Each structure stands twice: as structure tokens, then as C-alpha cells.
Amino acid sequence: MAEISRRTVLTATGAGAVGALAAPAAGAAPAPPSSRRHRPHHPRPVPEPLKVPEAIGSGGAVSSVDPYASEVGIQVLRSGGNAVDAAIAMAATLGVTEPYSCGLGGGGFLVYHQTRTGRTWTINGRETAPASFTPTSLTDGAGTALPFDATVSSGLSVGVPGTPLTWEVAARQFGRRSLRQLLRPAEELARRGFVVDAYYRSHTESNEERFRRFPETARVYLPGGRVPDVGDTMRNPDLADTYALIRRHGVGELYRGRVARAIVDEVRNPTTAPGVEVYRGQLTMRDLERYRAPVQAPTRVRYRDRDVRGMDVPSSGGIAVGQILLLMRAYEERTGRRVRDLPEADYYHWFSEASATAFADRNRYVGDVPGVPVDELLSAGYARERALLFDPQRAMARPVPFGSPDGDYEDAPGGGGRQGQPTQGQSTTHLNVVDRWGDVVSYTLTIEQTGGSGITVPGYGYLLNNELTDFDFVPLTPGVPDPNLPGPGKRPRSSMSPTVVLRDGRPEVTAGTPGGATIITSVAQILLGYLDRDLDLVDAIAAPRLSSRNAAEGADLGLATSPVGVELTARGHRLSPQRWIGNASGVAVEGRSLVAAAETVRGDGGAARVVRGRRGHGRQ
């Protein structure tokens, strides 16, 4: 075990770190030697960036959950970078300010649309299981699933991180700037610090007990042995040094170099507090060396006169969001009514039924396996067949049975058995960028649970993921094939749903959100609200959400107890009140105006920015 020294500094101040966000110059020198961090340091009292839910203008736009990340993105666009450049710089910044949701120790999915060519690419940065994993690796060997919570906070949950290689692939193939330049703002912010807000403090506080199980995590994220207060300045010099290391030597350090060795050592033998024992992981250097972040084609769904493009397997997001939209269209055909004209209770009822149906098929067919019937699941014929189960007045019994996407959709609704529901974490983050050329990035990244595995790479300042708990530990239904069981080198199924919508071949809107499996329902609702219900994008994001995942239905912002919720309950829906579902953001292209939008309430609000324009509200 490496010697532990206190290297993170916490200063109670209202000062921000805006000065650290200046756009980097080409070939900028590495950060100063680490010895300087021990000198007395008093940050200048620079105001903290503001959270603003909507910005309207031109020249480029960004939106995310975090004002520091959005400020970095706008500065990259202003200095001539493209959407991919801004997205990478924003993601690296979120690794500083949202370390419990994303970072170098996690993975994600990036969707990039290039308007000039009309092409859309995606980068699959999902984590992979060790080569030693088998379908029974998350069981006790006798067929019983290991305890979920104990598995999360252990080395056994850690997959090979995909985020660093995602950034390298994106910058090399689609960016205008080098990764060396793009990591500089995040490095400086980690070194100088950011202002702790209530959202950051609450997540630290909720993880305090778990973080104390791992001395390195407590050292980095509980500086001085305590949860930081709102208004404190939080610094992470270890992470700053790691960014500097990547800038000098490339991301290979995290897959083949000394950082990779530190990851493997810690995963296989986690350093814990006295008396704490956790499962050991199975990652090897060979697992890290073999990791790839492939560029893939997107999923495509034709919805009315739009082309909806999203993330393919191993994400279920593009498939499930597309299927929900197709089912809503099929319900229109069955009833002769339009989604845009529905009263609120009817709209939520339709949406709940479509979501439950899509999740039934997702759980049965989608995973990192050969032969996923993507084209059939996203066909209008299959949606019409599944719509035969729909009752406009009454909720279907949950769980809804999965269907048969076999190409024969003429006579009956088809269907198979009913399945239980998998467990999935809630923590992720999302960002959106549109640049001056009209190119778009929609990027969702994660470390899975809030705080990931709870394990910090010693000396390098970032948390490792617990993505392997996104596998089904045991088959959901005995005797029914489960595409999401563990396997060697396999990527666990995800719900991340970065989405770009085109109209007449040009971007119209992009959106995404964190929230585990609720990501799918949140993104689909935002798209329906904006495209069909005539809501401004900021209002489509702010609207109360219902998340029906083929079991009990979550409902936030008071929807469950509202008159609409009472009517839904009378129709057989089982609504479970929740404070917030998701923390979404998006950008809309409305004529010559760009409208960046983020949450107004959830997550204490988000951060929308445009290169040139104003903050405002309403379509232009």
C-alpha cells in the first residue's frame, strides 16, 4: 500500500475558478511542478459561473448540468473549436466538478452529426468486463446473485474505463484541436478549484460513509476529514496531475502505463479502512491493453418527418427511445387521435403504455450479444403489432410481456413471457454542443452509481466505475435467454440515450440526461414535448416526468398526487412519487437561432450558453 499523504486542499471561500477556464494556447506548457501545491494559496475572488436554464443566440451553443463545463465549452467554440472539441473539454471539466457522475474511471456514448456530409457517427466508450468473466461471475457459484450493494462498492464491479479512449478517438477523427489542448482547462480548474454548491455537497454527504471505507477516496473527496460546505473551494491536485500526464504522454498511460498498473493493483486488491472487506476484482493489464472504443453507425428511426438518430448496442437507448416514438404513432393510428391534441392524463397514459412495452422488449432482446433484432424492434410493422395490446382507457397489467420481432406482423399482437426487472444505478451526466458549422454532439457519460465503486485510483485523483453491476447477476426469468448476463470482454447493457433529431437533413434538436433506466423515458418525453406537444425546449425539459419501465411507475415534481396523477391511478397506473427524475439538457436549432436549454429545478438547475445572444425564454 502506497504511503498516504494529504494533498487535497480545501479553503472556505466564495471564490470561483473562472480564471482556470481560459482557452488554452497551442503547445501550452504543462502545469507547474507539484511541489507548488504545498505553498500557501489564496484564490482570487472571481465570481462563480451562473446556472442559467435557457440561452438564445447564434454562433454555437452548449448545455449541461454544470456552469463550469458550459463556460469551458463556449470558450472552446469562441476560439474556433468545433462541437467535438467543445464536448471533450466539457467532459473533462465535468470530471472535476461532477466527479461522482463521470470521469476518467468511467465510460459513455458520444453521438456526432456532421451537417456538411449529413453523416452521423457514434463512439462506443462503454466499459468492458475482464476476460475472466463468465455468466456466473456475479453469483455465489451456486446460482444465487451476490448482494448488489456489496458488489457495487468493490473491485468486482469495476470494468475497463472507456472515457479516456473515447476522447482520444473523438479528437483524432473528428476534432480540430489536440487532446493536449482540450484537457488544459480541466487541469487548471482541478488545480485552482471550484466552488462547492448544494448539489455537490449533498452527493458527497450521501456517500460519506461509503467513501470512508476507502482511505484514498476519503483523502480526496473528504478533505480535512469532512464533507465540504457550500461555498468552499474544492481542489483536486492529483486529478490535475493526471490530466497533465495525459497531455504529455497520451491516454496510453491509462491503458498500458503506470496509471494502468495502479488501476489493476487497486481493483484486484482494494485498499480499505481497518475492518472493511470488499470483493476483489479481476481486471488485468491485458484487459486494459485490449480495450477499444469503436466508431459505430447510429440507430435510425423515422418519426413523422424527422430522422431520429441515437446509440446502438450495447446501449438500449437508441432502440427503446425509437420504439416508444413508433408506439405513440401506432396508438394514433389505432385511435384516430393525435399526440399533440391529447389531454394531459391521456398523454401520460399513452406514454406509460408505450414505455412499458418498449422496456419489455429491451429486457428480453437487447444486450452486447450477436443478433439483436434492431431493425425489427425499430420497424413500424412491429410497433403496430405491439399496439394491439393498447387499451386507451386502462393500464396494461405489469409486467407487460415481451413481443416477437420476427417480421410477421399481420394477425396478432404476439408475445412471450413476463420478466422481472433488472437493477441499474442512477448517476450519469450529459452535455450537448452545436457549433458554428451546424455540427452537433450529444454525449452521455457515467461511472454508474453516484460515486461509482467508491474506489479512487491511489495518487491519481479519480473514482473508478461500478459498471459491471449493470449486468444481470442471474437470468431475469429462468428458461428465457438473457442477453445481459456477464461474459468475457462483454459490455454491460446501458440505458444512456444521447439523441440527435434531424428535419430535412439538418439538425433540429439534441437532448439527453442522466438517470439510469429513467434516461430512456426522460429523453422520449422531452422529444415528444418538443416535437409534438409544442413546448419550448426548456419547458419540455422542465415538465413533470413519468417513468414507466414495465413495473411501478415513477412520477416527479408532484405529478403523482396531482389531478392528472389521480386520474392515472384510476386507470390502473401505480405511481411512485419521486423528487426528481433525471437532470436533462438539450439544444434546439430554430431557424437562425440556437436555443440552449437545461433544467430549471432538477439538480438545482442546469447551465445553458450561446456564443452570441441573450438569455431568454420562448421560441424565436
Image (cartoon, rainbow, N blue to C red):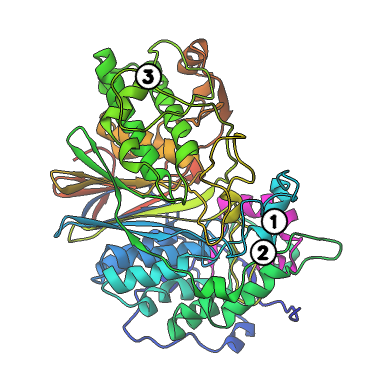
Q: Position of residue 55 (x, y in %)?
A: 29, 49
Q: Of marks 1 and 2, which one's residue comes earlier in the chain?
A: 1
211 part of magenta stretch: yes
Q: Is residue 540 visible in this depiction of the protein? A: no
> Do tag 1 and tag 2 residues touch (Cβ < 8 Å)?
yes
> What's the mark number on residue 344?
3
- Quadrant of the frame with the C terminus: top left
In the image, the segment drawn in magenta is 193-221
What secondary structure is marked by label 2? Answer: loop
Main secondary structure of the magenta stretch = helix
Residue 579 drawn above or below residue 218: above
Residue pictured at 46% horizontal, 50% vertical? 369
Residue pictured at 53% horizontal, 80% vertical? 256
Q: Of marks 3 and 1, which one's residue comes earlier in the chain?
A: 1
The quarter holding residue 346 reads: top left
How far apart are the two marked residues, 3 and 2, measured between alpha carbons? Answer: 44 Å
> What's the mark number on residue 153?
1
Q: Position of residue 490 (x, y in %)?
A: 52, 57
Residue pictured at 58% horizontal, 46% vertical? 425
242 part of magenta stretch: no
What secondary structure is marked by label 3? Answer: helix
How far apart are the two marked residues, 3 and 1, measured between alpha carbons? Answer: 41 Å
Amino acid type, residue under disc 1 in the picture: Ser
Which is more foreground, mark 3 or mark 2?
2
Q: Of marks 3 and 2, which one's residue comes earlier in the chain?
A: 3
Q: Which residue is mark 2?
A: 455
Amino acid type, residue under disc 3 in the picture: Glu
Q: Foreground: 196 or 283?
A: 283
